[in-house]
Amino acid sequence: GFQLIRIGLMPPHQPLMALAYFEQLKESRDGWEVCAQALAKGIYGDDHVKFFCFQVLEHQIKHGSLTGAQQQLIRETLMKWLQLQLMGGQPEKPFIKNKAAQVLALTFVREYLTIWPKFFFDLLSLVGLNPHGLDIYLRTLMAVDAEVVDRDILNVLHLAAIFGYNQETRRNTLIKDHMRESCIPALVESWYQILQTYQRSHSELTCQCLEVVGAYVSWIDLNLIANDRFVNLLLSHMSVEELREEACDCLFEIINKGMDPVDKTKLVESLSQVLQSAGFFNVEQEEDVDFLAKFSRLVNGMGQALVLSWTKLTKSGDVKVATETLQALEAKVPLLLQLLVHEDDDISANIVGFCYDYLHVLKQLPLLTDQQKNNAEAIMLAVMKKLTYDDEYNFENEGEDEAMFVEYRKQLKMLLDRLAQVSPELVLESVRRVFTSTMQGWQTARFMEVEVAIRLFYMLGEALPASHGAHFTGDGSKASALQDMMRTLISSGVSEYRHTSVTLEFFETVVRYDKFFIVEPQHIPSILMAFLDHRGLRHSSPKVRSRVAYLFSRFIKTLHKHMNSYIEDILSRIQDLLELAPPENGFQALLSSDDQLFMFETAGVLIVNGESPADRKQALMRSLLTPLLEAFRLLLNKLTQEGDEDRQTALADCLSHAVGFARYCPQGNLPAPRFSEILPPV
């Protein structure tokens, strides 16, 4: 067994051999005892050896059948190893300390309720205020949290309550109950001493401790933490640059703890007053965006906590306290607005939840005050501002930053939808004002201003929904406003704007409100030209052409009954877009094969649903598919004669596309050429 431990000295460039030896060591009868001896005496200096030794101990604790003497050996080993850390030498690497903390936590879970009830007292007695020892102690607390009270485990408790507690869940509950009764007050006192002692000299250790407090506060007695002594200490950390972000997170977890709505309101208001007095609500003066992102999350938690309290109090019929809670909530709205309009999207995004919930509160109120109406309008203005692209957005090569902005825009859309539920008139009028103003001067406006104006108009379609998209019938004022905006969109010439984001938004909006052309069909010719010329299917951007091919097919499906006068002109204009692009041509086709599928479907819909006589429809269908069949025949002959595998594959792909085009093209009851007519017999 002792010989096996020597494999840990193997250099890192032989990982497979080391792994094989490690597996042998785990399975050997006395290998773990050798590892325990090596750790207790600090025999090896190599990090990989020490890590392997802890892994072997971990395996034994999880899977071994230990006698009382062997359990005692593991306890002594861990305490001796911890004692070595107190001697002030070179501290262990983080990955070793984390593994040691995990092994300590596993030992705790296995023995705390039976033979080691003084686990934490022994740890605290040993480490005292030694920073190296406290580092391991705090890591162990986080590892215990992961094993026993991790949030993922808590989420399972509801299911466990329904289907019966399993053994592990019951054990975890007993551990927490016993900790609350015996050692939690001592642990909390140790946290206070760490935070007070090392807040200036050891910021890393202090941040670790703040993380521990945040993790444990969800299930321990809140009075141990939410008291003047502790909260004042946390607030002092908010003014220390190295600690302020972690202090924010810790305060967020305190606010997030489930509790009685009256007590929760008192807690939030007390924290709010202290933060405001300390100047933290003056966010315009704060330049540290990372801290503001954390602070925004804290304010979001405070706001959502007040909304939840108000909801519970309202349901319980406690009108007086509910009114006071609503007043406390309203007092946070100015701060909410400052954070929502902040130029940094991360800061803004972190407050969206509170904003959404506040609007939900307004929606439930029977009558809004003037101030509440002003708040709703301010949120509307903020949403319109924050929806706007910035100059750095890379439309040609969208990466992670661009994807995050797209997700952020989705959150803002949720706010717009909720605003429309609170005050549809406000949303309609605000969008109409911005849209009309921008369309009047689009030639000199920046692309992001034009795009967001059209985008807001597009978003009205879901914010103010209509059955089956019938936006232009029913509600007179809404229908009239939307009709005016559609006329402006089409007649303003904005479809000529030279930016892909504006072009795409234009066509998306036209198709969203395609039923407008049923009400005012005189606009169909001009919009068809936009689809068919350099603005749409012949745009310089492949991305635009591809999207327009799909949108055009949707547009035609909706309006096919109004296309009879334009069918042959459309078919003539798209004829070259329907040609197969065989691999030997050597030039890039305007549309991909997937895009061409939509075009063939569009052509088929036009022909089949037109009002021409059957023989004329048949002639049009033949003129559509015959070139495809002829190209198929030529390519098939080339395929049978081609010897190069890569070219065979390219030709086969092209043939497959041809079959797909014909299949995708709706023919109704019309007879049409079939591929079986030209395929050779099998």
Image (cartoon, helix red, strand yellow):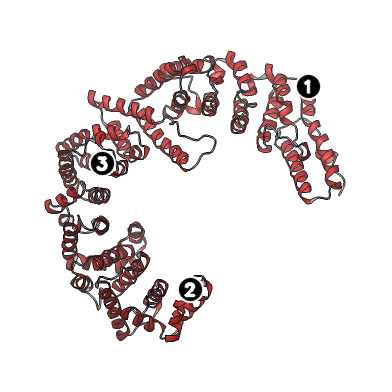
**Distance (Cα) linking label 2 and label 1:** 81 Å
Give the mark nearer the N terminus: 2 vs 1.
Answer: 2
Which of the two discs, 3 and 1, sits closer to the camera? 3
Q: Amino acid at mark 1?
A: Arg
- On the picture, is 138 further left or further right than 508? left
Badge 3 crowding class, 10 Å Cα cut-off, few under 14, some 14 to 19, many 20 or more, is many
Disc sitting over residue 299 in the figure: 3
Amino acid type at mark 3? Val
Q: Say which of 44 and 425 sits in front.
A: 44
Q: Nearer the viewer, residue 395 or 596?
A: 395
Q: Is residue 4 left or right of residue 595?
A: left
Give the CA distance from mark 2 to mark 3: 51 Å
Residue 644 location (% of width, % of height): 81, 50
Residue 29 sits in quarter: bottom left
Badge 2 is on which residue?
11
Q: Position of residue 19 (x, y in %)?
A: 49, 74
- Which dot marks residue 671? none
User: Contact, CB < 8 Å: mark 2 with mark 3?
Assistant: no
Q: CA distance from mark 3 to mark 1?
A: 69 Å
Between discs 3 and 1, the one toward the N terminus: 3
Residue at 71% of width from left, 27% of height from top?
608
Q: Circle 2 sits in a helix, a strand or a loop, which is it?
A: loop
- Residue, disc 1: 616
